[in-house]
Amino acid sequence: MMNLHQKYVEERYRKDGSLEHYSLTPTDNFNFGYDVVDAIAENEPDRTAMIWCDPTGLEKTFSFSDISRMSNKTANYFRSIGIGKGDFVLVILKRNYEFWYTAVALHKLGAVLVPATFMLKSHDVEYRINAGKIKAVIATTSCDVADAIEEAEPLCPTLTTKVIVRGEREGWECFDRGVEAASEEFERVETNIREPMIMFFSSGTSGYPKMVLHDHGYALAHLFTAKHWHNVNPDGLHFTIADTGWGKAVWGKFYGQWLMEAAILTYDFDKFQPKEILSCLEKYKVTTFCVPPTMYRMLLHEDVSSYDLSSLEYCTTAGEAMPPEVFKAWKKATGITIMEGFGQTETTVAICNTRGMTPKPGSLGRPSPQYRVTLMDADGDPCPVGVTGEIVICVKYGKPEGLLNCYYLNEEKTKDVLRGGWYHTGDTAWMDEDGYYWYVGRNDDIIKSSGYRIGPFEIESVLMEHPAVAECAVTGVPDELRGQLVKASIVLFPGYEASDDLAREIQSYVKRRTAPYKYPRIVSFVKELPKTVNGKIRRVAIRENDHDKA
C-alpha cells in the first residue's frame, strides 16, 4: 500500500539503505490543507494527528478527522469576518491547539499565514503589521500580546480585523463562539503551488526583521525534514519543542510530520522545566525528539536514568552549537546518537545527518539532496577541502522546493541573496575529506585577528562545555595591533560567581581544547545576552556596544 507522501516524491536507495536519489513531484494545485490533512482524514479518520497537553494536567487528543473538521469550521468562520485568499494574517497563538485549526484553515482559504511570537511588544507589532500589510490578527488571551496589538492599532491602517482566542475581549471578534457556530462543510478553494502560503519575520540579528515569503511548495519540502532527518515513525509520536511563532515549529510540529502521517506531541508550557519534558517523554512514549543543544544540556542536569525513555528511537538538534560533551552524555544516558542539522528561515533543512549516517560530533552533516549545496569563496569559486567559504544553494535551474520566493516587498534584498545563480545564505562553513560540513559562523560575525579568520561558533562550542557557562556569545573587539580581539560574553549558571580567577580558568579551558589563537582574550560576565524576540543572540548588539565604548 502506498503511503500518502509517496505521491509527491521519487526516491531511490542504495543497497546499504542510504539515499541515492530524492526529488519532489508536486502537483500544480498542491495545498497542504486539502491534499494532506483532508486526504488522511478521508482514508484514516481516526489516525492520531496530535496529542496536546499542558502543565495543569489538561490533555486532548486530535485525530486527522478532528483537524479536518475544525479547520473547515475555522475557514468558514474566517471567511464570514472578511478573511480570504491573498490576505496576510498575523497569528500569535503560542502552543494553543487552536494554532493548528487556524493554520490549516488559512491554507485552505489561500490566505497567508504569518506566525509570530507572543513576546512581541507594541513597537514590534506595529512594525510587523505595517511592513507586511497585515489585514487580520489572530491572538491568544493566554499572554498580554493583545494589549500590545491594541496599543499599536491606531498606527496600523491595514489592520481591519482582530480575533481573540480562548475568551472574549471588547473590540475583538470571538474565535471560540464563531468557530463553534460555523459549518463543517467547506468547498475547496483553488490555489496554485507557487502562490504565497506562509511568511516569517526573520530573527533580525541586525536591523529590522526581513519578511521571508514561501509558497505552498514549502510545506511539501518539509517531507525531507521529517522523513530523513527527524526519522519520524508513522506509527510513533514526534516531539519538537518550539513555540508556534518560530519557524522551527512548522519544521517539527506540522508539515513534514503530518506528510508522514505521524502524530505530534504539543506541550503547551510557558517556562521550560527539564523534569516536565522528561516526564512527557516517558508518559506519552515519544519515539522521535528534537530540541536545541542547550535544552539537551538542561535535560542532562536531571537524573535522566530515573525516567523510562525506552520508547525513544531517534533524536535530532539544530539552531546552535552542539557541544561534544553533551552529544556524548546524551548517548551515554539514553543510548541514542543526536543527529545535527542546519537550515534557515529561508530554507528547509539544507545540511544534516540523515538516518543511516554516522555523525561526527560538532558537524552539521552533509548537504540534503533536496538542494545543490556548495561552499563558495569571496571570488565566487568553489572552496577546496578544509577551506572556509559561504554556504550557497544553486538556483541556476530554478527555485528548489523549500527555498524562499522572496523577501516580501524588498526587491533589493531579494536580488542580493539570489545572485549569480546561487542563493547566498550568509553562513560560513568548511568541508572535511568525507564531505561533512563544519559550521564557522555568519559572514558578519567572522572575527579577523592577527591574520586569522575565526568563527564564533567553534569557540562557543568549547565554552559551552565548561560547567560554569550557561550561555555565551563570542564577538570581535577592535584592536590596533591585531585588528580584532576575541571576546566572550558569558552568562553563568547559578552557583558560580564572576571573578578574574574564573575568567582565567575559562581562557585556559579554551586554549586546551582548540587552537590557542582562538581563545577569548577578553571575558565579560553578564546577567543576560541581547536577543531577538525569537530568542537568537544578537552579536551585533554586543559589537555595537563595544564600539560605542571604544
Image: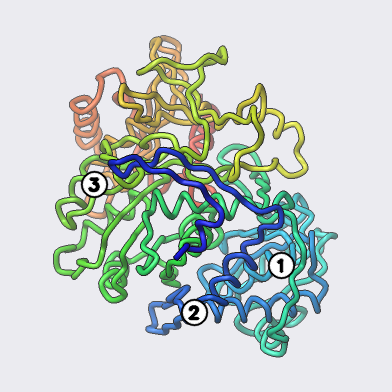
The Cα atoms of the two marked residues, 3 and 2, are separated by 36 Å
Residue shown at the point (55%, 49%) measured from the top left: 221
Q: Which residue is denoted by mark 1 in the rendering?
A: 137
Mark 1 crowd level (few <14, some 14–19, many ≥20, 10 Å Cα)? many
Amino acid at dot 1: Val
Residue shown at the point (19%, 33%) measured from the top left: 505
Of 407 and 44, the residue lying toward us: 44
Of mark 3 and mark 2, the one earlier in the sequence is 2
Point out residue 446 in the picture as x, y percentages from the top left corner.
Answer: 46, 24
Determine the image quadrant of residue 406. top right
Residue 326 badge: 3
In the depicted structure, whether residue 54 falls above or below residue 293: below
Amino acid at dot 3: Val
Point out residue 53 in the picture as x, y percentages from the top left corner.
Answer: 42, 78
Q: Which residue is denoted by mark 2 in the rendering?
A: 63
Residue shown at the point (61%, 74%) measured from the top left: 101
Asked if the residue at tag 2 contacts the one at tag 1, i.e. Cβ–Cβ closer than 8 Å, the answer is: no
Of 360 and 23, the residue lying toward us: 23
Q: Is residue 235 visible?
A: yes
